[in-house]
Amino acid sequence: ADYDHWAAQGNPGWAWEDVKPYFLKAEHNERGADAWHGTGGPLNVMDLRSPNRLSALFIQAAEQAGLPLNTDFNGATQEGVGMYQVTHKNGERHSAAKAYLTPVLDRRNLQVVTGAQTTRVLFDDTKRAVGIEVSQGGVRRELKARREVLLSAGALQSPQLLLLSGVGAGAQLQGFGISVVHDLPGVGRHLHDHLDSVIVIDAPRMDESFGLSLGGTWHALQGVFEWRRSRTGMLTTNYAEAGGFLRSSPDEAAPDIQLHFVIGKLVDHGRKTVFGHGVSCHLCALRPRSRGSVGLHSADPLAAPLIDPAFLSDPDDIARMVRGVKLMRRVLQQPSLAAFGGRELPNSAAAQTDAQIEQFIRNHGDTIYHPVGSCRMGPGPDDVVDERLRVRGVQGLRVVDASIMPRIVSGNTNAPVIMIAEKAADLIKTDNR
């Protein structure tokens, strides 16, 4: 439904039946191929080798709460609770770089430049992108393109680079002394993301969880030796092993919230050291309505962009999150997990009424690292790229990353961005043929 929505917004070629072949092409699922999964692709997908017992207890608790079991979130039905498949291979993360880049580093037509930062796109007098400027070791140099430039800096820095290059709202650019190449007001607008709200359970008896303790340290050392010996054990975890796609209200036509169950006390996304054992459960609203922006702090390309996520600026988002927290609590309080005698950390435990839960979410919300939409694809005056990912109003320039999404997908963004890149490769080959 996400991709059919993209197409309905005026983006032909992006409906589910159009993009599904690229998901299948990208994937090598160790479960095997079927109508929803591929084999033989670059990206390895598998079940966790050594899942933690607590993850199975979370799924059991969800079933005790009356929620359905789902053994494949990426199959015919998304709704339910179960284990996540992971992009792992042989006991470690299988990233897009390992899948696509590492195997072809010796190709004659590929040169990888590291330790460099792109500072702007170069245009000629006809508004055609002819290359990029990069900063490397404090020295700036130009790299020229014979055909076109592909911008893949993500939803926070692709719009920043367009603005630095003179493509964006003209008045904003002139305010920073940047010459306007093309007045395109949608650049940097419509930023949105999955907001994360977390309940952390302190449970000393959950000594199977990841935690800082004498026993936890000993288990981790054993895990190191097991991983080196057989590529199995606790170090193969992705931490967020189980979760679910659920409806915050029976009136919802489809899942509108997602849970991630983490086998450790993850406070402030791991930025703070926490002693002892326990678990965390993360919640996000799948299709938030709030929209933020990415702009410039200055004309200095090495300065961070000005980011305003505008989380919870639409009241619909906070209403779904409040309902989601109550549903998440219902799962965590079921016998399978309650048997450990764990307790919520005080910052969430004190939030009981809807108003208190809302304030807790506002005070402690964080990103799930899924920013999208800031170079939105579409036919309208506020859109940045067309359905072939070409930047409107200029030539020889495309954006290929999560920033082009008209609306965020109802789940994690890693596989969809890889799909976008696979489809972009075919668009580029067709247009250059």
Image (tube, helix red, strand yellow):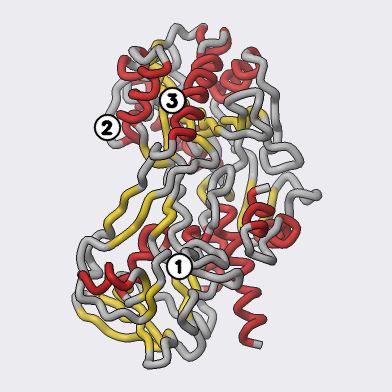
Decide if residue 90 is on the left or right side of residue 322.
right
Residue of label 3: 280
Q: Earlier in the sequence, mark 3 or mark 1?
A: 1
Direction right: furthest residue: 35
Q: Where residue 414 sits in the image (x, y, percent)? A: 54, 52
Against 81, residue 9 (above or below) is below
Secondary structure type for disc 2: loop
Task: Decide which of tag 1 and tag 2 comes sooner along the chain.
Answer: 1
Q: Are marks 2 and 3 in contact (CB under 8 Å)?
A: no
Point out the tag, 2 or 3, that comes first from the N-terminus: 2
How packed mark 3 is, by other alpha carbons closer than 10 Å (few <14, some 14-19, many 20 or more), is: many
Q: Residues within 10 Å of mark 1 (few under 14, many from 20)?
A: some
Question: Could you say which quadrant of the image residue 280 lies in?
Answer: top left
Q: How many marks?
A: 3
Q: Please state which of the two labelled residues, at mark 3 or mark 1, is closer to the viewer.
A: 1
317 vs 57, nearest the viewer: 317
Q: Residue at x 23, y 67 (%)?
A: 302
Residue at (56, 25) in percent of width and height: 55
> Callout 1, which amino acid?
Ser
Instruction: Report whether 196 appears left or right of 45.
Output: left
The residue carrying mark 1 is 152
**Above or below 63: residue 237:** below
Mark 1 to mark 2 CA distance (whole Å): 31 Å
Q: Element type at marker 1? A: loop
Residue that badge 2 annotates = 272
Q: Quadrant of residue 207?
A: top left
313 and 324: which one is in front?
A: 313
Instruction: Look at the numbered disc 3 and give the secondary structure of its residue.
Output: strand
Residue 266: where, in percent of width, then height? Answer: 37, 29
